[in-house]
Amino acid sequence: MFEQVFESLRKATETSIQMQQEMFKKWVSLWPVVPPFPPVGEPFVKFQKKWAEFAGDLARKQRETLEAQFSAGLKNIEEAFGLAGATNPEELRARTVELWQKSFESLRQLYDAQVRDFQGVVAKWTEFLGKGAA
């Protein structure tokens, strides 16, 4: 039984990682290769500073999301080991269903947070490019 739980957790984790990689590829594809104005003088220095700030914020948000995901995963693993303490099959079933629901709720919250972060990044990036080009 634990093998099925761990296999499901492994598949969910792999899917989550694949989605994060795809989102990151999409984010990177939105970034221009060259700055929207020629690299001379003060405007270029301002662009570099804004770019560094933008990239740092993006990395911090990604780290926070990953930390939350790993914390939730560790908590679920601990709860999975706690299933062995069930005294009868009905209690085991109830605790397993509860763990399953918590796991998928955690994944849903993670994906919601990633979508919100992505929307925020796109809005910031659009604003950033709009000001940089003006």
Image (cartoon, helix red, strand yellow):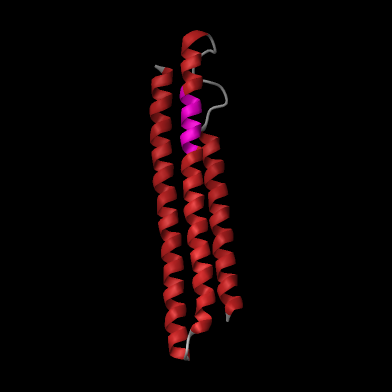
Residue placed most toward the observer, 36 or 68: 68
- Identify which residue is drawn at 48% across, 19% down: 47
Q: In this view, does 130 lie to the left or right of 36?
A: left
Q: Position of residue 79 (x, y in %)?
A: 49, 72
Residue placed most toward the observer, 10 or 25: 10
Type of secondary structure dominating the magenta stretch: helix
- Identify which residue is drawn at 53% across, 27% down: 32
Q: Give the range drawn in magenta.
A: 50-58
**Quadrant assignment for the C terminus:** top left
> Exactly how many numbered labels are in the figure?
0
Q: Where is residue 70 in the image (x, y as percent from the top left)?
A: 52, 57
- Magenta stretch holds residue 113: no
In the picture as drawn, the residue positioned furthest to the bottom comes out as: 88
Quarter residue 97 falls in: bottom left
Q: Position of residue 57 (x, y in %)?
A: 46, 35
Q: In this view, does 10 lie above or below 90?
A: above
Q: Is residue 125 above or below residue 42?
A: below
